[in-house]
Amino acid sequence: MTSRPQSQLLTHPAGLIGAAAAGFIVGLAANFGRKAIVQGVSAAQGEWDAGLKAEHRMALGIFDLIEKTGARDVKKRKILLVQLKHALSKHAFEEENVIYPAMRDHGQVEEADKLVHDHGYVKQYLFDLSELDPADPTWIAKLREFRSELEAHIREEEEELFPALRDALGEEGNAHVTSVVNKAGFAAA
Ligand SMILES: [Fe+2]
Ligand SMILES: [Fe+2]
């Protein structure tokens, strides 16, 4: 294209498409960078189970922030709930697509199915909380009930089921699962 002034470029249909494509590429690059940062936090922990533990701590940290809010902090509660939803969705994607299938392949079938069942109720809590008014006393009561159930699920994973999978996988298996879970985390970030 010959040198058209910028204003003409943007009003010309081809210029518009070019600008949109450039914007799309910039958007893709920004999204890639964002995903790399989000997944980098978990990947930096090293092994798959350490990464997932770090994500558990991060989710519980969001619960801490919510519990520090008052009934009047409606906007803050809504924002933190969205953050919690994002963190738990990414985490569930990694566990449901990599860790639980690996558990089933190593004989932990009922255990993996039970964890998927728990995740269903995580989504139930998130839905109920987003439907309720954050200023209503039932909202914070439900959030605390959610936290205590999630903590029990986390304890089961960290203290019992993940160590059992770790032992069953062996060195190569653990390295492979770490790499696959990081890819899943990047896709979901
Ligand atoms: Fe889980
Ligand atoms: Fe988990």
Image (cartoon, rainbow, N blue to C red):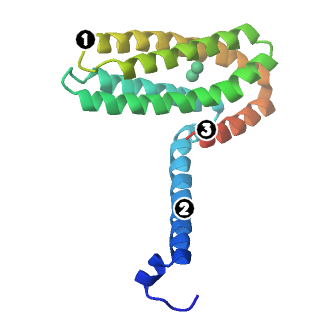
- Which of the numbered marks, if any, corresponds to residue 107? none
159 on left or right of 59: right
Q: Residue furthest bottom?
A: 2
Identify the residue under disc 3: 185
Amino acid, disc 2:
Phe
Residue 105 drawn above or below residue 145? below
Count residues near mark 3 (Cα–Cα under 10 Å), then give few for <14, some for 14-19, many for 20+: many
Identify the residue under disc 2: 24
Q: Say which label, 3 or 1, has the lower sequence index.
A: 1
- Residue 80 x, y percent position in the rendering: 35, 31
Q: Label 3: state its secondary structure.
A: helix
Residue drawn at 24 percent across, 24 percent down:
69
Residue 45 drawn above or below residue 24? above
Count residues near mark 1 (Cα–Cα under 10 Å), then give few for <14, some for 14-19, many for 20+: few
Residue drawn at 53 percent across, 16 percent down:
154
- Which of the numbered marks, if any, corresponds to residue 137? 1
Amino acid, disc 3:
Gly
- Residue 79 x, y percent position in the rendering: 33, 33
Looking at the rendering, which quadrant does residue 99 occupy?
Answer: top right
Residue 11 drawn above or below residue 189? below
151 on left or right of 52: left
Q: Label 1: state its secondary structure.
A: helix
Q: Label 2: state its secondary structure.
A: helix
Residue drawn at 31 percent across, 24 percent down:
66
22 on left or right of 99: left
Q: Nearer the viewer, mark 3 or mark 1?
A: 1
